Image (cartoon, rainbow, N blue to C red):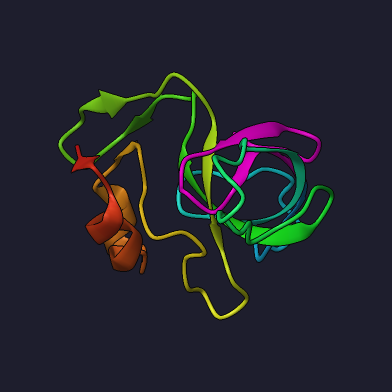
Amino acid sequence: MIRTQSLLKVVDNSGAKLVKCIKVKKKSGKAYANIGDVVLVAVQSLRPRYGRRVRLKMNKSEVHHGVIVQTRRLFRNRAGIGVSFASNSVVLITQQQKPLGTRISAILPSRLRGLKWAKLAAMAKKII
């Protein structure tokens, strides 16, 4: 479960490395987010640039929207199989629900495909 002030790892190539959760969106009063929920995040650290021609899409302390794709908390699918991940991770998106990056370097749960995030599932390295 992701609450405000939680540090999250960014698993896409948008340029951010570590973000902090500011607010959980569209949960009607609940203070935590699970996989597939939209959160408002602030960029804490950036990935290093390799060469001058690499243009970053963001700067430090900018505010973006993100989708939770991995949590350390165990969740079960309909078959009863439990899945948990090593870290709490997020993929950054625009306000129009489009991904900022072009690649996702993480294994995503298949639950995202059913939660209107099929575009993220298509960009992922692997789906379990």
**In percent of the image, x 84 and y 49: which residue is there?**
61
Q: State the residue in front, 96 or 78.
A: 96
Q: State the residue in front, 39 or 107.
A: 107
**In percent of the image, x 63 and y 34: which residue is there?**
8
Q: Is residue 104 above or below residue 120?
A: above
Q: Is residue 114 above or below residue 83?
A: below
Q: Which residues are magenta?
A: 1-21
Residue 29 falls in image quadrant: bottom right
125 on left or right of 49: left
**In percent of the image, x 78 and y 41: which residue is there?**
4
Residue 94 falls in image quadrant: bottom right
**In percent of the image, x 54 and y 30: which residue is there?**
88
Question: The N terminus lies in which quarter of the figure?
Answer: top right
Residue projecting furthest to the bottom: 96
Residue projecting furthest to the top: 86
Give x and y (percent) for residue 42: 78, 49
Query: Within the magenta stretch, is there residue 8?
Result: yes
57 on left or right of 103: right
Question: The C terminus lies in which quarter of the figure?
Answer: top left
Give x and y (percent) for residue 18: 66, 35
Give x and y (percent) for residue 41: 73, 51
**Numbered-mark total:** 0
28 on left or right of 85: right
Query: Within the magenta stretch, is there residue 123?
Result: no
Q: State the residue in front, 46 or 85.
A: 46
Q: Is residue 72 above or below residue 69?
A: above
Give x and y (percent) for residue 120: 34, 59
Residue projecting furthest to the left: 79
Residue 63 falls in image quadrant: bottom right
Q: State the residue in front, 19 or 110.
A: 19
